[in-house]
Amino acid sequence: MTARPTDYDGNGKADIIARDDSTGTLYIWAGHGDTTFGAATKLTTGW
Ligand SMILES: [Ca+2]
């Protein structure tokens, strides 16, 4: 897995996006702004 923090949805709270290198699937964990994150959500495949 490779991951980096970025504000993917533009709400001012850093989210985590990670790619599963074995499947090329991108997941996002939406940040709550207090260092906690929501459940993983599949973004897209083919990465
Ligand atoms: Ca965000």
Image: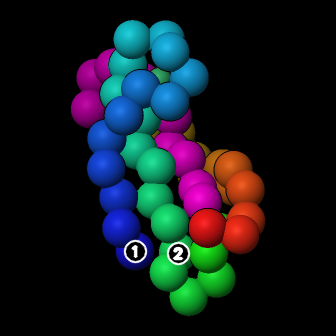
Q: Amino acid at mark 2?
A: Asp
Q: Amino acid at mark 1?
A: Met
Say which quadrant the N terminus sits in: bottom left
Residue appearing at x 60%, y 60% in the figure = 26
- Neighbours of disc 2 within 10 Å: few (<14), some (14-19), many (20+): some
Q: Which residue is mark 2?
A: 20
Residue appearing at x 36%, y 34% in the figure = 6
Which x, y percent locates residue 10? 50, 15
Q: Quadrant of residue 2?
A: bottom left
Asked if 39 appears above or below 27 in the picture, the reply is above
For the magenta stretch, what is the residue range?
26-36
Which x, y percent locates residue 31? 42, 30
Check disc 2 and report its element: helix, strand or loop: strand
Residue 22's label in the rendered image is none
Left or right? Give the position of 20 relative to 24.
left
Residue nearest the observer in this picture, 4 or 47: 47
